[in-house]
Amino acid sequence: MRIIHDEDGYAFTPLAVLLFIPVIIIAISYGNIVNEANMLAGLATGGDVTVTVAASIYSTIEKAAADAGRNAAYNASRNVIDNAEFFPHGTSKANITGNIVDAINYNVINTSLELERQTGRQIYINDIPITNYTSATFTMADVNITQDDPFGFKVNIRGGIPIRIVQKEQVYEFRLPPTSAYVSIEGIEDPYIWINTKFRQSNVIYKYPYYATNGSYRDYRMNESVDSDSHLQNLWYCLNGTDNPSNITPRSYYFIDPDGLSFFDRLENRSTSADPEYTRMSTFILEDPLLEDHNGDQYISKVDREYFLGIAGTTIKVKNNVMYDPLGYPFCLSATYKNLLGLAASNYS
């Protein structure tokens, strides 16, 4: 079998060269290649390694964005819980973004240095040799966070940042395309619940699975049936958090709520939100941890934000009996949430 060598002595069989072709096609698609002539010429002169280095850098940036986002969100939540102190208003998103930028820089610099060591190529980002960087290839101006739903956010890295890989007279250049990675916040503990219930109650963010939309109509499907135990489904399922992996005490699911709070609102202990409606969520408070603060009044709405504000609620009846939560406390909702969740009927049978 004929073996092909590049300048540094890396050996490739004809099959290996063919295997690199999809990587090159991907690089064209994702990399916004500036100098395609150099890239194509590289096929005959060992450019397959150079192109692979470029693809590795892009992959590192994309994966680092996702990993850094999840880690930064978790650390922000733990910071609030462990210090019993919320972020000042307007600072949680900036804090998370800053931590994401730091983590991306760490990963990109270290990966690029290792690629240089392994391949003999020289890597330049923003026209600066990677060996000249100590901490910052990307800045806060290069990265931002956006949300399309309450249960995660996107880490967006701006496009146009020039990257160059050099091997002797061969130069491979491209500009980083706009890069986006989705970060789920499911499974992260909600500090808003922990602190506002005076360190008594924990809840982990998991989305209620039965929510559906029909055009502009929100169908929460919480009143579909009464089961054999006289539980109103799927409201009971939402309260019980059946699929919560802790399996210790019930932790209610979170549902999409246009009047609720975003993840960043919760880090800042807001009572109302300025974030878009589609980024907001709510959950139910189980038991009655602030009973004494409500002067012994059990008839307080159990939607988290309303419960902490002390907004009055009324019970729900199932088969002429008052409905209790999974921990044995009367379950109440305000008229606003009974209407929103489709639970305004006087009795379910």
Image (cartoon, rainbow, N blue to C red):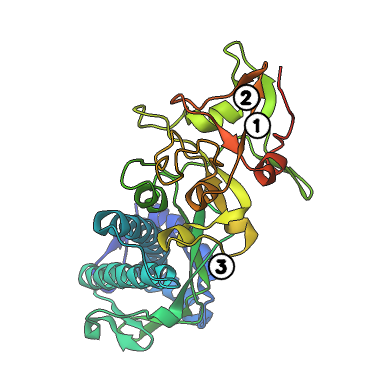
Residue identified by numbered label 2: 233
| Residue identified by numbered label 1 | 222
Q: Is residue 332 left or right of residue 38?
A: right
Picture coordinates of residue 236, whole percent (x, y):
56, 26
Badge 2 or badge 1: first in the primary sequence = 1
Which structural element holds mark 2? strand
Question: In terms of image quadrants, where is residue 218?
Answer: top right
Left or right of 255? Residue 57 is: left
Tell me the amino acid under the disc marked 3.
Ser
Q: Nearer the viewer, mark 2 or mark 3?
A: 2
Say whether marks 2 and 3 touch (CB < 8 Å): no
Q: Is residue 152 left or right of residue 164?
A: right
Residue count near mark 3 (Cα–Cα under 10 Å), binned few <14, some 14–19, many ≥20 = few
For badge 2, the amino acid type reads Gln
Residue highlighted by disc 3 = 29
Q: Is residue 336 visible?
A: yes
Q: Secondary structure at mark 3?
A: helix
- Tag of residue 7: none
